[in-house]
Amino acid sequence: MSPKASWICVALFLGMAAAGCTSKSNPTKENFSNALQSHLDSQDAACVVVGAVPFDRPDFHNFSQNQADALVKVGLLSKEPTIVKDGIRSVVASRYSLTDEGKKAYRAIDPVADSRLCGGKAKVLEITWSSSVEKAELGTSVDVKYVGKLVDRPRWDDEAILRPFFPELLSTTNDQFNGENILTLTKDGWAVTR
């Protein structure tokens, strides 16, 4: 190969490499999908806020106790009778503790009141909408809506039992859900920022 042909090959290769390096910053559905998938891969798909465990609930059959009982039904918590103080009197209550499955799903968070039970994974199926952006520069943000699918639904994620008590639980139809995130262009490409 002649020196001129070698330089042409090198120039073509560098041009293709440069195009490949900048392409991840383009505001395309493919780049948005990759950023969302990277985010979903780093997160649990389904979570319910439970706070510190173990905990006691007086047997008043209120919303808080109904939430805990729903988690017992799906196998994340166990329930035993106990007595707790309610002001100056003692009342019948239940002590809720993590089961073995609950221990695997428990995610301690600071503050502890935000701790949750989580599991499962999801994947992006389709970008359905994004706010328009003419020129993407570092720091540019876009709002992206998508359709996702639970590909690894936690065994305990029974929406019929949990959804009435945990509105934060991902609502799905045939394991599919609608999602929305803000993506921001970073030096490494698009990423979920909030």
Image: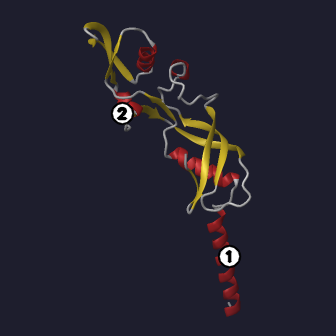
Is residue 2 shown to the viewer in this render? no
* Residue 50 image point, x, y percent: 41, 27
Question: Is residue 194 toward the left or the right of residue 83 in the image?
Answer: right
Q: Residue furthest bottom?
A: 3
Is residue 66 shown to the viewer in this render? yes
Q: In this figure, which residue is indicated by the disc labeled 1?
A: 15
Q: How far apart are the two marked residues, 1 and 2, measured between alpha carbons? A: 52 Å
**Above or below, comparing residue 45 to residue 87 in the picture:** below
Mark 2 belongs to which amino acid? Val
Tag 1, which secondary structure? helix
The N terminus, quarter of image? bottom right
Q: Nearer the viewer, mark 1 or mark 2?
A: 2
> In the depicted view, which residue is nearer to us: 84 or 120?
84
Q: Residues within 10 Å of mark 2 (few under 14, many from 20)?
A: few
Q: In this figure, which residue is indicated by the disc labeled 2?
A: 112
Number of labels in the image equals 2
**Above or below, comparing residue 127 to residue 19 in the picture:** above
Which mark is on residue 111?
none
Tag 2, which secondary structure? helix
* Residue 126 image point, x, y percent: 68, 43
